[in-house]
Image (cartoon, rainbow, N blue to C red):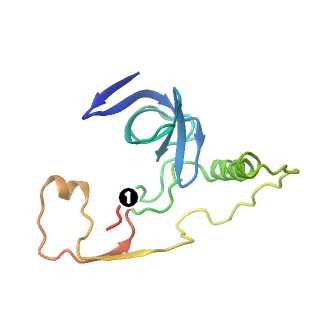
Amino acid sequence: MSRKTKDLPILEKVTITDVAAEGKAIAKVNDWVVFVPYVVPGDVVDLKIRKRKHHYAEAEAVHFHEYSPVRATPFCEHYGICGGCKWQCLPYEEQIKYKEKQVVDNLTRIGKIEMPQVSPILGSEKTTFYRNKLEYTFSNKRWLTREEVEKEVTYEHMDAVGFHIPGAFD
């Protein structure tokens, strides 16, 4: 079920089962809840563990064995890089369904609130090419594409302005 690379296990053929907060999805492996970005329920993937805690882990999908039947093709060329629109791989109607489930779950399971009948979330007519929050980064160390890093390109000027890159805090 798992193999190791550089002391971090690879979990093989794991089925993604649910959606979590902050653009992540969930898989359950033994006693672990594993949070994974850029996957959707129904995907079957190999996961590389990036962070491990006592009862949960964070991982990234390193290989897809099967794509979920509800998976969508992201519409933006910057998907997965700019930090916004984390659910482009999940159709908007499915996003609404999982967000509603998350609200109800947070109130009932975590908040211990008895909920009456919940009205469905009203979706937006505009579902592509918008942002409801913009944060810019100014830096003297611009972001390099994977190709630039692999080619060991050197730039004389590295000043940059743009959106925050996921996981980059400098």
- Whether residue 136 sits left or right of residue 105 in the image: it is left
Whether residue 18 is situated above or below residue 132 in the rendered picture: above
Q: Position of residue 46 (x, y in %)?
A: 40, 32
Seen from the viewer's position, the closer of residues 70 and 101 is 101
- Whether residue 41 sits left or right of residue 59 in the image: it is right
Instruction: Say which residue label 1 marks.
Output: 167
Whether residue 62 is visible, yes or no, is: no
Q: Position of residue 120 (x, y in %)?
A: 79, 54
Whether residue 162 is situated above or below residue 68 in the rendered picture: below
Q: What is the quadrant of the N terminus in the image?
A: top left
Seen from the viewer's position, the closer of residues 112 and 142 is 112
Residue at the image point whose x is 54% and y is 70% from the top: 131
Seen from the viewer's position, the closer of residues 169 and 47 is 169
Q: What is the quadrant of the C terminus in the image?
A: bottom left
Seen as rendered, the residue at the extreme right is 116
Q: How many marks?
A: 1
Label 1: few (<14), some (14–19) or many (≥20) C-alpha neighbours in 10 Å: few
Residue at the image point whose x is 35% and y is 31% from the top: 10
Q: Position of residue 54 (x, y in %)?
A: 48, 37
Q: Position of residue 38 (x, y in %)?
A: 46, 47
Occupied quadrant, residue 130:
bottom right
